[in-house]
Image (cartoon, grey):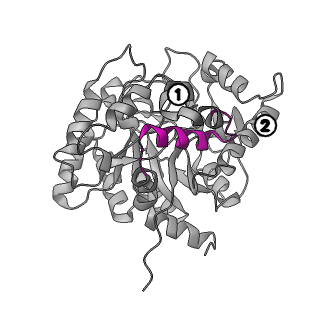
Amino acid sequence: MTSDPAPLRVDIHCHMGQIAKPCQEHDRFSFEPAGKPLSLDAYLSPRMNNSIGMRAAKWFFGLPRGLPPRETDAAMETTLLRHILNARLLDRAVVLAFDQYHTTDGQAVGARPNRSAIGTDLYLSNTYARSLWQRYPRRILFGASIHPYRRLGTMTAADMLAEVAAAGAVLVKWLPQTQNIDAQDPRTVAFLRQAAKLEIPLLVHFGPEYTLGHHHKQFADPAGMLQTLRQLRDDGDMPTVIIAHVATPSMWPIALATRPHRILIEALAGEFASAPLYADIAALAMFSKARWLKRTLRIPGVRAKLVHGSDFPIPSTPLFFRSALGKEYHRVRQMPSWLDRDVAIKSAAGVGEDVFRRGGELLASRIKAADALASIV
């Protein structure tokens, strides 16, 4: 009698970025028609593209300067994919779509021109994210992003979720304070019920957010989501929900423990201990969050709820784990794939094999469906 194979090592939290990627003409989702109303499959707002952080990222990755946007985008895609495809310490990486900001009445708002304006800083279509998986199905998984307030004619966001799930999506990404998503809105609740029915998890960011726009700071608190999940749990309709970054503050030691992090930890170790609520450790190996990784691993009852993610292309910081890495420090620092570097740092910090394989466990049925679509045996 043979035992079942171990779950895959999956990085559930990876991003791609493009300055202005034109829509591909064919093989599109029905709710993302080319040029109607959006002519791009991915973009960065002018504010985001010209930010200090973006300039630093281009320098870190050695991207050529002074190229036209289309050539810069091609170089960016090639560079980011090289890190993902050449990772040796992982089986798969989920590359995430990222939907636009939507108003409360469901209207998409395009690129944010300046810091004070409301709009979208980062957009990456489901069509583009799926195309990356279709090109590299043995290394990449398709992470969708559908705003729950979306509509297209009679088609609701829940209908769109069914379409991406049937097309190979393994999870859905939300950032409520950036995208304007109220966890208690009836449309959000309907979407979550559909996710439970389709057995597709959600990766949701609560806690502080500094990179993208955050005009709806009231949605940074996971309390509303926890209340909705209580209702869905009692109804037998709770989907798997993974909270990004364990809702940690971003700038230790300036920021101490915050309410989002505290109430999430209490929920994971307490009333949701036996429910499908988890947290990923994405970005917790970077310098501003290193302390939170070390603290989180020591909290009783929480370790069994942790899922591996990197938040690539956010860089991990070996220097802040030098004592844990010991003689491995220089080797880890020189790893060509940043995804591998993130895994090596977290392993040295005490993250166990169970955490690295929990994403593969939670996404197992979705990965099996995606592999069948891609004809992977």
Where the N terminus falls, by quadrant?
A: bottom left
Up-down relation of residue 220 to residue 192 (above or below): above
The magenta stretch spans residue 130: no
Q: Is residue 205 left or right of residue 211?
A: left
Q: Residue 339's mark?
A: none
Q: Is residue 344 left or right of residue 202?
A: right
| Residues rendered magenta in the picture | 333-352
x%, y% of residue 358? 41, 55
Up-down relation of residue 135 to residue 66 (above or below): below
How packed mark 2 is, by other alpha carbons closer than 10 Å (few <14, some 14-19, many 20 or more), is some
Name which residue type carries label 1. Answer: Arg
x%, y% of residue 152? 49, 50
Q: Which residue is mark 1?
A: 322
Q: Is residue 56 left or right of residue 353?
A: right
Q: In the picture, residue 161 is in which quadrant?
A: bottom left
Does any portion of residue 156 appear in the rendered image?
Answer: no
Q: Earlier in the sequence, mark 1 or mark 2?
A: 2
x%, y% of residue 290? 44, 28
Does any portion of residue 363 appear in the rendered image?
Answer: yes
Q: Which residue is mark 2?
A: 75
